[in-house]
Image: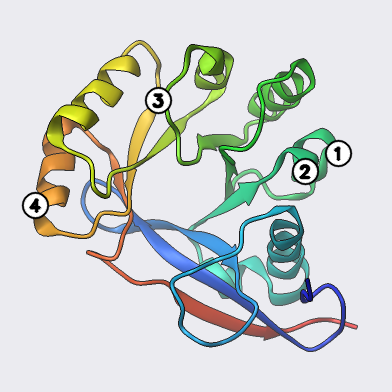
Amino acid sequence: MTTALSSYGDVFVGRQPILGPNLKTIGYEVLYRNCEVDQAHFTDDSVATATVLLNTYLDIGLEHVVGSQLAFLNIPQSFLLESFCEALPKNRVVLEILETVEPTPRVIEALTHLSKQGYTLALDDFVFHPRYHQFLELADIVKIEVLGKTEEQLTEEIRRLRDYRVRLLAEKVESQEMFTLCKTLGFFYFQGYFFYRPDIIKGREIP
């Protein structure tokens, strides 16, 4: 894979707004883009995440990408275990723990440390399972993909989370009907094409 880490030149990152209960933008999910063409697909593997973290924070500048808002950044397991997250400003980022991250003792230890340091933790594309109990104990936000789900399915997912002190983020909201349903069910944050499509920020790498 060719990424912006492999040579100096243009840097592209995609961002999609995340809205609060008053529908004002509170942050942006920031993802790697390998070109300027407007496509819906983003890459979110470890290499791409490394690219967006380094390019956003070191090359482009966080202010240029998200302004004064929060940057929601996908964090793979390798970043957690190598303590790379602590290079990021805790008051400017939300660390989205990818659904591929396993709740191993080392991962739980790393997340516990980050939580104690004041970092905000979100569980990305979350699907409930009892083995994720420790994740939920540490998380501040749980992102639930709502596209294609019924009211009954979402109600059951929320019921399983009611014993945890987390705020719910509805992602892939693509219609007024789904937005209204999510508000009724108690979702606090919202993200999806119904509000905004992702846009692209372009910068230059620093040699």
Label 4 vs label 2: CA separation? Answer: 37 Å
Q: Where is residue 174 in the image (x, y as percent from the top left)?
A: 22, 60
Q: Where is residue 184 in the image (x, y as percent from the top left)?
A: 11, 36
Q: Residue type at mark 1?
A: Glu
For disc 3, the marked residue is 166
> What secondary structure is found at the residue carrying circle 3?
loop
Q: Residue type at mark 2?
A: Phe
Between 67 and 131, the one lying in front of the other is: 131
Q: Position of residue 50 (x, y in %)?
A: 76, 58
Q: Is residue 179 left or right of residue 140?
A: left
> What secondary structure is found at the residue carrying circle 4?
helix
Label 1 vs label 4: CA separation? Answer: 42 Å
Badge 1 or badge 3: first in the primary sequence = 1
Between 94 and 184, the one lying in front of the other is: 184
Q: Is residue 24 left or right of residue 68?
A: left
Compared with 187, 137 (above or below) is above
Label 3 vs label 4: CA separation? Answer: 24 Å
Compared with 161, 198 (above or below) is below
Tell me, yes or no, whether the two marked residues, 3 and 2, touch with CB atoms within 8 Å: no
Kindly identify the residue that appears in the image at 35 percent across and 72 percent down: 197
Disc 3 vs disc 2: which is toward the camera? 2
Tell me, yes or no, whether the two marked residues, 1 and 2, touch with CB atoms within 8 Å: yes
For disc 4, the marked residue is 177
